[in-house]
Amino acid sequence: MASLTTSPPVVTPLPAAVHAPATVRIEPPHGWLDLRLAEVWEYRELLYFFVWRDIKIRYKQTVVGVLWVVLQPLLTMGVFTLFFGRLAKLPSEGLPYPVFYFAALVPWAYFAASLSSCTGVLVSNQHVITKVYFPRLVLPFAAVCTPLLDLAIGFVVMMIITLAYGYRPGRAILLIPLFVLLAQMTALAVGLWTCALNALYRDMAAIVPFVIQFLMLASPVAYSSTLVPPRWRALYHLNPMADVIDGFRWSVTGRGHGPGAMIFVAAGVVALVLVGGLMFFQRVEGTVVDRV
């Protein structure tokens, strides 16, 4: 009797669902208040890449390397100590002149480097922004983040100098990150305006160094804020960097003036300039590719 064998049935897998390719529409901002900050957060990895790239480029093929971060404020401190301290004998709030000046030069050097870098960031990256799309706000954000490494190194040197002169910081040193944040937001707020204007008018590249020098004279870097007459101090402390520098000195040494009520007014001024800079930058962003 013949047996009949049958092969098992072949199960054919169902075809996977075919997904249509995602379509991304790139549109200009709708109105002045369409800031698209959430889009910047989505590109945070690109922000990290720009920061790391700028750090590598800055210290690549340099003889002294990262020591420049230390030498520049040290040399400036020596000049200030000699001319403003020993010769002009300006008051230093009871602090040794090296401590007094270096505690001001660390945050000021960060602000000046951030503002200068932020101003030219669109023009220096024109080969990137003309080829691929990404939120242009990533560039000025990266410009104010890159000098944070220099600030950290300068802060370590400042602590060494302060401890060498016998000053022991107290709990007020925990407020240093708040002063750094205020300096960063100030540089970003002003830098957004100068960055966008520099993409439209190259004159800004020549104006900004003068602005930085003027702001340095309007900030208590080479002198104590106590020299400002009382009737002008409210107006004087509208400059956020005046509060940042006074705050640095006070936090590290315990001498000088701590943050008062005017620091909140200065923070409000920074917030207004920052929001205005974001709106202006977004309006310029739509045409910046054709202008750079």
Image: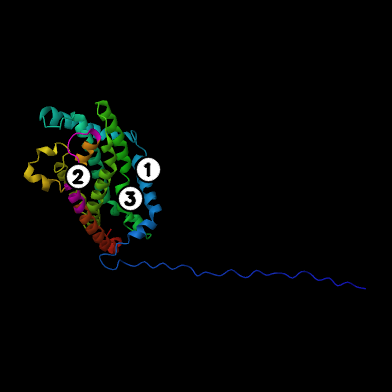
- Viewer-nearest of labels 1 and 2? 2
Q: Secondary structure at mark 1?
A: helix
Disc 3 residue crowd, few under 14, some 14–19, many 20+, Cα 10 Å: many
- Viewer-nearest of labels 3 and 1? 3
Q: Between residues 74 and 278, which one lies in front from this camera angle?
A: 278
Q: Which mark is residue 56?
A: 1
Rendered-image quadrant of the C terminus: bottom left
Question: What span is colored magenta in the figure?
Answer: 252-268
Disc 1 residue crowd, few under 14, some 14–19, many 20+, Cα 10 Å: few
The residue to which callout 2 is attached is 241
Q: Residue at x 29, y 48 (%)?
A: 144
Query: Would you say 249 lies left or right of 27 here?
Result: left
Q: Are marks 3 and 2 in contact (CB under 8 Å)?
A: no
Q: CA distance from mark 3 to mark 2?
A: 21 Å
Query: Would you say 145 lies left or right of 14 here?
Result: left
Q: Quadrant of residue 151?
A: top left
Query: Would you say 106 lies left or right of 129 here?
Result: left
Residue 161: x and y, percent? 26, 29
The residue to which callout 3 is attached is 142
Rendered-image quadrant of the N terminus: bottom right
Kind of residue at disc 2: Met
Residue 141: x and y, percent? 31, 52
Q: Residue at x 20, y 49 (%)?
A: 264
Residue 76 seen by the camera: no
